Image (spheres, grey):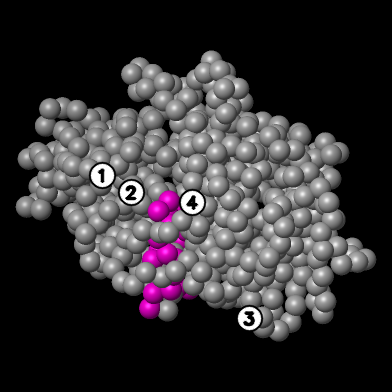
Amino acid sequence: MTKFCSKGFAWGPSHQEDGALFRLWAPGIETLALRVGSVDVAMDRRDDGWFEILIGDLPSQVNYSFILPDGTAVPDPASRYQLGDVGGPSILVDPNVYDWKHPDWQGRAWEESVIYELHVGTFTEDGTFRAAAERLGLLADLGITAIEVMPVAHFPGDRGWGYDGVLHYAPHNSYGTPADFKAFIDTAHGLGLMVFLDVVYNHFGPEGNYLPTYAPPFFRSDDPTPWGPRIAFDQLPVRQYFIENVIYWLAEFRLDGLRLDAIDQIDDECDPHILQEISDTVSEQFNQRHVHLIVENPVNGTDMIAERDGRPLFKADWNDDFHHALHVLATGESSGYYAPFKDAPWAKLRHALARGYVREGVQKLPGARIPTNAVAPTSFVHFLQNHDQVGNRAEGNRLYSMVGVDKFRIFSEILLLSPQIPLIFMGDDHLSSRPFQFFTDYKGQLAQAIRENRPEEAKNFGCLFEDIKNDAIVDPNSLKAFHDSKLLWSEAFLEHRRRWRKWLAEVVKVRRDHVVPLLIPAKGNSGKVVESLEQCLFIVWQLHDHQLHLRANLSDHEVECDMPSSTQIYPVAARKDATLPPMSVSAFIKAGTR
């Protein structure tokens, strides 16, 4: 297990009784200075490549930078807050300045999760933590129990999705201060909402990363990721950087969990693997409250979510297979990432609902392969769309704009009445008319490269390009791409949108009252596909001593659906006969085993 600096974290400024200790791992240089305000002070170099210096009597909010031998001023890679852009000075932050209003919050059980993914910059017109906090009550009223915030780690420019962050400890200053982010989380807790943060531990963004200039061993020189140099997790200071980052967000900001982006690009030959060490550290240090770690694992490895030594390493994985199969059968699009689901999408969707992954997974950890059906259904996060599937489309259009609200309603019922953990993308709660587009704030050649790559990237997400001209794709670096993506909250209060929200709240309530009690805890080998017609989904899950039955008919005619000796939980009005109407969903609970 990683050993941490006895005076605090190895990375970033550490507050001491007699001042602030500044440290930086810079094995590629022999001298380093600290600039505090306008004064430069030489730092002491240790044999292991760490530089450090203790400075007394410093006020919080003072600016500081590290000065390289050639005179270049660089920010602290573990900066807690930035003055200006990623290349500007870092700011010394007092971690205790925020007064928590709900310090006794203990979180919620994972099974209760109904997740709402949001991007702080476009969730409101102001695009700040404080403005976002003002809207959280509307989500709590719907029955949402968890907010998943897209990455906030400081990235280049004023706007972006956040997956190109380079200062992983610093909330982006366009959203507000660290205290503002804490206030957002505190407000959520007061409303009974968990808050998860999306973090990116597989690469650094292409601009503003100065680590290679003074710490070349931080990255591997071979086998880059699709987004940049691969991180060298076999180096102890590198492991410390990321494990401390996990602790930092969970402890100082009291987050309820983290979602680790694209872990298939996190390679490590050490024992334990960095992903296992992150999980073990969280399990040991945060065992007095509910803390949930989620992954995005495109290679479908069950080793990340199956029980190992009595617990899974991660609570759940984003199951793209469910989304991709549903998207193909809903839209007919089958290019790019959807191509493997072109054939038999109905069968693949049934498989995803009953068993989990459709495609065989790739293990990262040693040990016997665990089949996907042996993993509990709550180990999968399901969604009709998320930031990727909307924002990477050519026009950023949403699923209901393509298939209509009636079909989207049916799909939403399937999502919410199944035992997997549901995720709703921001704006879908009120059928937002606003797109969510890919946007960045780059200049020069990098901006041009991103602009030129957009058509090819959009093809990966199913766009039928014979119907879309390239000039219809908004330049990601334009303000238009950003501003057009902002939710228009006045829409939520229009009559037909209010009706949608009221209906959505009713379905979420059915989930809370009837489905969630069966999931504590859910086990593997629970799902089974029941024979049905092509445009139907008949699934049964054995959950303890009860069965949960889902019956969905997306055809244009009635189908037989006889469920004797069972309790209908949805719809609320009881069926009068043993048929399922066209375009409808029913759910039942039946006592006993199959």
On the question of residue 95 being in view, the answer is: no
- In the rendered structure, are the residues bearing label 1 and label 2 in contact, judged by CB atoms less than 8 Å apart? yes
Discs 4/3, front:
3
- Give the residue pinned by disc 1: 230
On the question of residue 276 being in view, the answer is: yes
- Give the residue pinned by disc 3: 544
In the image, what residue type sits under mark 2? Answer: Gln
Residue situated in front as seen by the camera: 17 or 266: 266
How far apart are the alpha carbons under marks 1 and 4? Answer: 22 Å
Residue at 51%, 69% (x, y): give it: 373
Discs 1/4, front:
1
The percent coordinates of residue 518 (x first, y second) are: 66, 75
Image: 480 above or below 314 = above
Tag 2, which secondary structure? Answer: helix
Discs 3/1, front:
3
**Tag shown at residue 197:** 4
